[in-house]
Image (cartoon, rainbow, N blue to C red):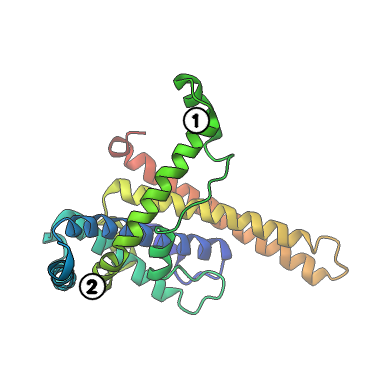
Amino acid sequence: MYIDDLIGSDVQVFKAALRATANSALTRAVGIALRLAGMFSKHIGNGVDGYNDLQSAIAAAKDKAISLNMAGRDADSLEALMHRLMSLYLSVNARLENEQWHKPMTIDEAVLLLSTDRQYDKTEGAEYIAALAKVLGESEDNLRARQAKQASKDAERNRDLAPLASTLLEGCGDTGESEDQIFTDLPVTVQFGIFAKAVDAAANQLDRDIDRSMRFVNSKSSVLRNLSISDTAAGKLALNDLEAQFTKFIEHNRDTLDV
């Protein structure tokens, strides 16, 4: 699978794809942890008893997280998926620990990201919003206000659940398996989502590389001109290779992905 090709490469396009792989796995794991934390919170009372219940739930969550990490695939599917995703994140994150520009998010950063009100770009999903507004007879502004209100509610809920979710995540560990093995043991739809993020990040990195290389196009130094060309060429080849692997992945899993 594609991850082995990314590891150890000095090509910036591949490093960006590897970082995106780690971040995608992490944010998915955080999402599951928040969902599980919500399930736990339903059994927590109020007052002193509620505090004791919360501490017990946190302790139980941590114990179960550790046991699930040891149990691996025999564990409950949702929790096992969280552990698999965290294992992928932790393994890739360790590979990039000395990177300055391509260091993945921390667990705390990811939890904060999913617990913070999001400011929506009005161009995001513009065509869908316009079509939906027409069907419903609503204004686009009203629909976007509704979207923002729901996002704010989700963020507020996630902030309340963040401590327990973090406890669940802290119990996860690296399995010691290769990143490709961890990846291929994930559900195909999850693999697709992570792979797509990696390809998108690689394409964005190539765009940045091209913009940077254009600064040297009129340089008096042939060394700088040639270096910018060779770097961009390497990035383009890397992206082509990654996209070819992604296309092959989609073709191989077309029935499962329903595309």
**Residue ID at (44%, 60%):** 113
Above/below status of 253 relative to 162: above
Q: Is residue 15 left or right of 195 when viewed as pictured?
A: right
* Residue 92's disc number: none
Residue toward you, 53 or 257: 53
**Residue ID at (47%, 44%):** 148
Whichever of labels 2 and 1 marks the residue nearer the N terminus, that label is: 1
Dividing the picture into quadrants, the one containing residue 224 is: bottom right
- Could you tell me which secondary element the residue under label 1 belongs to? helix
**Residue ID at (49%, 71%):** 103
Across and down, in percent, residue 60 comes to 13, 70
**Residue ID at (12%, 61%):** 75
Query: If the image is split into quadrants, where does the N terminus sit?
Result: bottom left
Say what amino acid the circle numbered 2 marks: Gly
Across and down, in percent, residue 24 comes to 40, 57
Residue toward you, 2 or 258: 258
Dot 2: few (<14), some (14–19), or many (≥20) neighbours within 10 Å? some
Q: Residue furthest front?
A: 47
Query: If the image is split into quadrants, where does the C terminus sit?
Result: top left
- Residue holding disc 1: 128
Q: Is residue 247 visible?
A: no
Say what amino acid the circle numbered 1 marks: Tyr
Q: Is residue 70 left or right of 129 when viewed as pictured?
A: left
Across and down, in percent, residue 45 comes to 14, 61
Dot 1: few (<14), some (14–19), or many (≥20) neighbours within 10 Å? few
Across and down, in percent, residue 115 comes to 40, 59
* Residue 171's disc number: 2
Residue toward you, 211 or 133: 133
- Could you tell me which secondary element the residue under label 2 belongs to? loop
